[in-house]
Image (cartoon, rainbow, N blue to C red):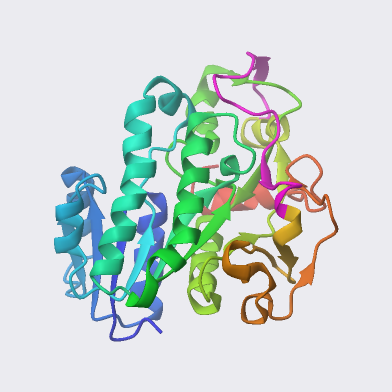
Amino acid sequence: MFDASNILVTGGTGSFGNEFVRHILKNYNPKKLIVFSRDEMKQWEMAKCFPNESRLRFFIGDVRDKDRLYRALSGVDYVVHAAATKIVPTAEYNPFECVKTNVIGAMNVIDATIDQKVKKVIALSTDKASSPINLYGATKLASDKLFTASNAYAGEHGTRFSVVRYGNVMGSRGSVIPFFIEKRETGELPITDFRMTRFLITLPEAVNTVIYAFKEMVGSEIFVRKIPSIKISDLANSIAPDCTLKEIGLRPGEKLHEQLISSDESAFTYEFEDYFKILSPLNGWNSCKKRIKSGEKVNEGFVYTSDMNKDWLKNGSLEKWLKDQNNY
């Protein structure tokens, strides 16, 4: 579906954007792949990784700037919205800036993609958007609601919107794995709480989930991939088995366990082999057969949390991943 098409990814110089660009250029033949981001240095560094790649374009811009988005989206067929203020403590201490990027920015992307007649838009979300207790999660929940509702807002323009929600991306910027790798030389790793658990997903898995959602979406779905959990203390011991672990307490806005699907969302959630799909109740979309397809409705009160997960990262899996990344 991406061959001979124009694709744009907001926040395209981030960890996801880099992996997405590599995947698309290797497996498809788009007419043009646009990286839209506000950091010129990251764009320059990224461009060096793709020498003589005529299909790749770089566009300096900010999702807060609607006029710039309109210009960048001219002639674009597909959009991945990955731009976000995402570090939880940063969002807690800079709430206005977080709202401007994650909520106002989402509104700008929606308006611009509709008016520029983009075919499909996938917005990236997070486990922190499910029953949020921090500002980052609250803004991403608002963003999820905006994108799913925009399938009605778009009217006859035809642009379709869906969301992909997943957990912590292994090795991404700002995540705990690079932090532990950096700190292990000190002989001590800080752990906020020894009981803490998190969902983990690799970058290739995150990209494949987005590709799947583009192909599967009708509009308004929230796609949730089934992914394993891990205790943060076990993660630390795998990365630095000789280090002492020091419990320091939860940071502002931090949860002990994360959640991808809440009990309230269970009423609109369907299970597939490798995914869950949360359907919006707007306009009866949650009972639409085109959206449900072969999905089985989950039990009432079902929750998908990192501490009650059936799938846990197996012994040796993390070590293998670290070795593959030349980080171990």
Q: Is residue 121 toward the left or the right of residue 108 in the image? A: right
Q: Is residue 265 toward the left or the right of residue 298 in the image? A: left
* Residue that protrudes farthest toward the right in the picture: 299
Question: Image point 60% across, 29% down: which residue?
Answer: 133
What is the span of residues highlighted in magenta in the rendered image? 241-265
Above or below, 3 against 137 in this view is below
- Main SS category, magenta section: loop
Question: Image point 67% across, 25% down: which residue?
Answer: 242
Above or below, 234 against 163 in this view is above
- The reply to whether residue 189 is visible in this rendering is yes
Depth check: give the residue in front, 94 or 13: 94
Q: Does 305 appear in magenta? A: no
Question: Image point 51% across, 79% down: which residue?
Answer: 215
- Position in image of residue 200 (x %, y %): 63, 48
Depth check: give the residue in front, 108 or 15: 108
- Position in image of residue 124 (x %, y %): 47, 55
Name the quadrant containing residue 254.
top right
Q: Is residue 281 toward the left or the right of residue 315 in the image? A: left
Depth check: give the residue in front, 131 or 31: 131
Q: Is residue 238 toward the left or the right of residue 20 in the image? A: right
Name the quadrant containing residue 225.
bottom right
- Position in image of residue 39 (x %, y %): 21, 43
Q: Does 252 appear in magenta? A: yes
- Position in image of residue 297 (x %, y %): 79, 67
Depth check: give the residue in front, 291 or 227: 291
Question: Image point 17% across, 74% down: which residue?
Answer: 54
Quadrant placement of the C terminus: top right
Quadrant placement of the N terminus: bottom left
